[in-house]
Image: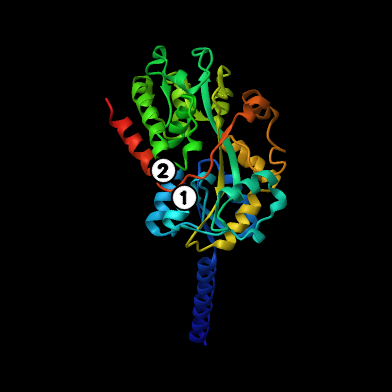
């Protein structure tokens, strides 16, 4: 009798263990390749509470996203967030994404003009590969008490600010300096020879400017710490960086450069070998809800493409945006078009030479 009960009890334990194991095996995880601040812990927790889906967040940037997905043929992640100008070229060259099923996107939550623009800029052979999420600009972050005369990117090269400025050694810097030098790099996208001539002039300027650079920053937090410590008083940076610092250092402002800020939109894109496509669409529709979008805007420091996505953003942050970008500055934003295949290799060689220069 006792032996029989023991067998029964063992069977119950084994059965329960199998149910738990099966439940754990079936628990879904969304592997998200994104930018810092785009998937705040609280939002991830709320999403899991509602859907049962865990989110595994890997912070990255455009170059790393392309590199990671290229190396795996589009595997390893279920949802990525490249900028809209970095999708068509990468898809044409490396075939690392799969088309977006727009019927699974709640378009009513997204600002129509941004959705339509992103669809156009991420289309390859008539198929759409991205929908918009967070948008903003690369502009100037300046401690106006220490560098009151910095109004454009070239002002970062003023000898009196030697060792006190910073910018990334990435393609946005090349584009920004081209515009500041009076050229239009976007107009030359279809002519590699003309684009190379622009890059040559930018390369010479960046090498000449090198003595002014404290460091080429690679992450927003690192830049913020440099400005906070006073080591850097002016930088080409994402607008959100300046707004974050302003909360504790009111003299630090985000300024729209006279040659025009560079406008970007970070998207949602499906890696070609995603294993959690349904979860990816659930995440997209979840984070574009106005109340969730406001949480992401507060964490990321930039607004999203969600309609009414600023509903819960504090008034102070809205005011900072309006001060940085009055109507004329917004009209002067240079929005990134898709990058043609081959241009990034040209730009990479320029950046290598600039960094190697003495």
The x, y position of residue 268, in whole percent, is 56, 51
Q: Which mark is residue 7?
A: none
What residue is rendered at 46% in x and 55% in y?
A: 92
The answer to which image quadrant residue 164 occupies is: top left
Q: Does residue 218 sit above or below 233 in this rendering?
A: below
Considering the numbered disc 1 on the image, is that residue within a helix, a strand or a loop?
helix
What residue is rendered at 60% in x and 54% in y?
A: 283
The answer to whether residue 65 of the structure is visible from this angle is: yes
The x, y position of residue 70, in whole percent, is 40, 54
Q: Nearer the viewer, residue 46 or 312?
A: 312
Considering the numbered disc 2 on the image, is that residue within a helix, a strand or a loop?
helix
First along the sequence among labels 2 and 1: 1
Q: Residues within 10 Å of mark 1 (few under 14, many from 20)?
A: some
- The quarter of the image holding the C terminus is top left
Left or right side of 78 for 297: right
Q: How far, Cα to Cα, is label 2 from label 1? A: 9 Å
Q: Nearer the viewer, residue 146 or 315?
A: 146
Q: Which residue is mark 1?
A: 89
The answer to which image quadrant residue 40 occupies is: top right
Q: Which residue is mark 2?
A: 343
The answer to which image quadrant residue 229 occupies is: top left
């Amino acid at each position: 009798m006792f032996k029989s009960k023991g067998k029964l009890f063992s069977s119950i334990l084994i059965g329960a263990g199998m149910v738990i194991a099966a439940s754990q095996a079936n628990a879904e995880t969304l592997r998200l390749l994104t930018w810092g601040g785009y998937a705040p812990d609280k939002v991830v927790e709320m999403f899991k509470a509602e859907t049962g889906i865990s989110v595994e967040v890997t912070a990255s940037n455009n170059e790393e996203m392309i590199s990671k997905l290229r190396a795996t043929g589009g595997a390893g992640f279920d949802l990525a967030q490249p900028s809209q100008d970095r999708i068509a070229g990468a898809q044409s060259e490396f075939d690392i994404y799969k088309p977006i099923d727009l019927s699974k996107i709640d378009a009513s939550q997204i600002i129509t003009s941004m959705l339509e623009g992103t669809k156009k800029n991420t289309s390859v052979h008539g198929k759409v590969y991205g929908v918009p999420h967070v948008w903003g600009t690369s502009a100037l972050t300046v401690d106006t008490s220490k560098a009151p005369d910095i109004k454009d990117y070239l002002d970062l090269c003023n000898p009196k600010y030697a060792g006190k400025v910073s910018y990334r050694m990435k393609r946005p810097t090349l584009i920004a300096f081209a515009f500041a030098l009076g050229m239009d790099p976007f107009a030359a996208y279809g002519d590699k020879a003309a684009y190379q001539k622009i890059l040559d002039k930018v390369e010479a300027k960046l090498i000449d400017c090198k003595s002014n650079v404290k460091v080429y920053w690679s992450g927003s937090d690192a830049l913020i710490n440099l400005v906070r410590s006073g080591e850097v008083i002016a930088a080409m940076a994402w607008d959100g960086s300046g707004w974050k610092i302003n909360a504790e250092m009111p003299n630090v402002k985000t300024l729209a450069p006279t040659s025009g800020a560079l406008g970007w939109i970070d998207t949602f894109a499906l890696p070609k070998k995603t294993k959690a496509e349904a979860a990816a669409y659930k995440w997209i529709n979840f984070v574009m809800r106005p109340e969730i979008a406001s949480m992401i805007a507060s964490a990321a420091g930039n607004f999203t493409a969600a309609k009414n996505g600023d509903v819960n953003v504090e008034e102070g942050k809205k005011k900072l945006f309006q001060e940085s970008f009055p109507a004329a500055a917004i009209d002067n934003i240079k929005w990134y078009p898709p990058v043609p295949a081959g241009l990034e290799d040209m730009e990479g060689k320029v950046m290598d030479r600039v960094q190697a220069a003495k």
